[in-house]
Image (cartoon, helix red, strand yellow):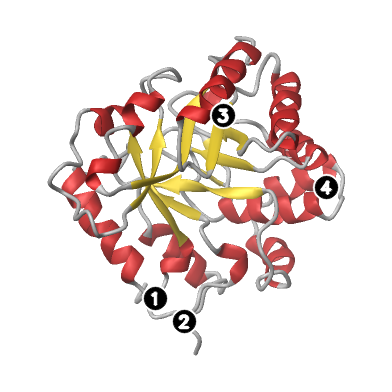
Amino acid sequence: MSTQVPALLHGLVDDAAVFPPGSAALHDALAAHRQHRAAWYADLVGPLLIPASTVAAGELSGLVDPGEGLVVGVIGDTGIETLPFALSFLAPDGVTARQVEVAIAKRGEDPLPGIAALLRLIDALPGVEAVYAELPLTFGLMGGLDALAAARADGVPIAAKFRTGGLAAELFPTPAELAAVICACRDRGLPFKLTAGLHQAVRHLDPETGFTHHGYTNVLAATLAAAGGESVGAIAELLTALDPRPLLERVDVRRDAPRPLWVGFGSCSILEPLTDLIQLGLVNGGYDA
């Protein structure tokens, strides 16, 4: 039996172990990330995500071998303007920031000033392959996507990021809202990341909070449908599905092709989504779930 992760799932799950609800200590997260990168399922795993505040505080010093080649994603928890300062702490530790992610507006704010501020700093983020601007799914969203698409057309390595969950109901977009956003990105040729709320493979109700969470297999099937030109309504249906079978029918036939549009999502556990993907038959492998 092949233990390789199919191309469709490569880099799907970034390692967000230090973020809630896992909130692992940095040294523990680093140790676990090294194990993930050496495991048979390493192709599933993206970079270790670290807050900019942690990087700027020098907390990586002494924890990383300069020859290790550690690759991270930096989450701009201290805002846009502090990103170059935070990244300046990485080089002495031999760490490479593959991506930077930062919120550019609060809910209800015009995202264009934040996008402009981020674009002014791009040249001060050396070696970064991708910058993700987190946009709220509220006022000014489409104008913000237009601005990101225009910058990307000019060769700027920028893309979108959206929140799909959190501690309040309004942070969970409806299937129709998320479908519209996916199609908007498709129409602009704009890759996107998602964050928060994607805790299981299939859409489900959390009995503790009462919130209904999106499933990452739903999002994967929906994104494939969007890339194939299907309508917002058809994509919303896939995001609403509680039965994995129609999702798997969509996903399985594309397993050997690169994933379009959706860059992936962060999870404070790598083994939980891995286990789900094995149980759904999307990954065949050597992890004893």
Q: Mark 3 points at which residue?
A: 133
Identify the mark nearer the N-term, 1 or 3: 1
Q: Dots 1 and 2: beta carbons under 8 Å?
A: yes
Instruction: Determine which of the numbered discs, if any, sits on residue 40 in the image.
Output: 1
| Tag in front: 1 or 3 | 3
Q: Residue at x 42, y 19 (%)?
A: 79
**232 to 68, vertically: above or below:** above
Dot 4 or dot 2: first in sequence order is 2
Residue type, numbered disc 2: Thr
Instruction: Please tell me which of labels 4 and 1 falls first in the chain.
Output: 1
The percent position of residue 6, horizontal first and vertical second, equals: 58, 72
Q: Is residue 167 visible?
A: yes
Residue type, label 3? Ala
Would residue 32 appear left or right of 278 to someone viewing this image? Answer: left
Query: Which residue, given by chain and number where applicable, does mark 2 sit on?
Result: 3
Bin the neighbour count of mark 4 within 10 Å (Cα to Cα): few under 14, some 14-19, many 20 and up. Answer: some
Dot 2 or dot 3, earlier in sequence: 2
| Residue 184 picture quarter | top right
Secondary structure beneath dot 2 equals loop
SS at mark 3? strand
Q: Is mark 1 on a helix, strand or loop?
A: loop
Q: In this rendering, does residue 163 appear at all?
A: no
In this view, 224 is above or below 289: above
Query: How far is disc 2 from disc 3 in space, using C-alphas?
Result: 34 Å
Q: Marks 4 and 1, how far apart in space?
A: 35 Å
Residue 234 - label? 4
**In the rendered structure, are the residues bearing label 4 and label 2 in contact, judged by CB atoms less than 8 Å apart?**
no
How far is disc 4 from disc 3 in space, using C-alphas?
A: 27 Å
The local crowd at label 1, few if under 14, some if 14 to 19, many if 20 or more residues have their Cα within 10 Å, is: some
